[in-house]
Amino acid sequence: MNEIQTIPIGKLLRADNRQFVAGCRVKELETPALGALVKVRLQDQSEVYGLITRISISDDGLVRQLASGMSIPPEYTADNRHNRNLPVEIEVLTLGFAQDGKLYHQLPPRPPLSLDVLYLCDDAELVRFTGHGKHAYLRHILRLQDMPVEEILVSHLSKARHAHEAAFNHDWYLKACEQLVILLREDYPRLTTVLDALSAME
């Protein structure tokens, strides 16, 4: 397996087979974004892939004190954002895994462990993962509960479409939309909502 060429963006706090949460510093938030593909490499060299579904920034005692002031000097804000370990959490939905050089759009046999490093996948790896098989990983996204599924799909498909078109895979996006229609064919209201959201990309 090739060495990781991706960017480390955080370390895992907790995980199960379906999802995991990583913590990072505020200054690392310039890299990850909603709908981005990420991965964790396990000790057995297999890799678990997932999609960023939420990024949350919690407050703490110092933030409350600073926010309650009438004015905050710029250097205080900069120090708080870049030098302190603010409680930033990145929630990730598991989409599949790689083992022995093969990709699977299924839940992994075991979850990552606490303090495993979370990496942001580059465009080449995004193309490799999303181009494998018949877009079966999309079913995991559609099962999300209490999440803005349409917005997550738009963000993810926009990134993936750009990466595939740069790699001259110009029919990838159309096939992804066809797979969404198949997966949602028994839920017409939701299909309509998803297609309406995707139309904003055109």
Image (spheres, rainbow, N blue to C red):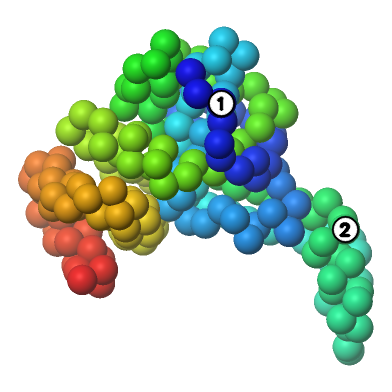
Q: Which sits in the foreground, 73 or 54?
A: 73
Residue identified by numbered label 1:
3
**Element type where label 1 sits in the image:** loop
Q: Position of residue 146 (x, y in %)?
A: 42, 51
Can I make out residue 92 in this image?
no
Q: Is residue 192 above or below residue 1?
A: below
Amino acid type of disc 2? Asn
Q: Is residue 116 above or below residue 37?
A: above
Q: Is residue 109 above or below residue 131?
A: above
* Mark 1 or 2: the one toward you: 1
The label number, if any, that marks residue 14 in the structure image: none
**Element type where label 2 sits in the image:** loop
Residue 93 left/right relative to 58: left
Q: Is residue 15 above or below residue 52?
A: above
Amino acid type of disc 1? Glu
Q: Position of residue 46 (x, y in %)?
A: 50, 17
- Please state, as top left, top right, bottom left or bottom right, where the C terminus lies in the image: bottom left
Name the image quarter holding residue 102. Answer: top left
Circle 1 crowding by C-alpha within 10 Å: few under 14, some 14–19, many from 20: few
Identify which residue is drawn at 52% across, 57% down.
33
Residue identified by numbered label 2:
83
Dot 1 or dot 2: first in sequence order is 1
Q: Position of residue 8 (x, y in %)?
A: 65, 41
Q: Position of residue 163 (x, y in %)?
A: 34, 52
Name the image quarter holding residue 81. Answer: bottom right
Identify which residue is drawn at 57% across, 10% down.
44
Q: Which sits in the foreground, 95 or 102?
A: 102
| Label 1 – label 2 distance at C-alpha | 30 Å
Identify which residue is drawn at 88% across, 58% down.
83
Circle 2 crowding by C-alpha within 10 Å: few under 14, some 14–19, many from 20: few
Q: Are marks 1 and 2 in contact (CB under 8 Å)?
A: no
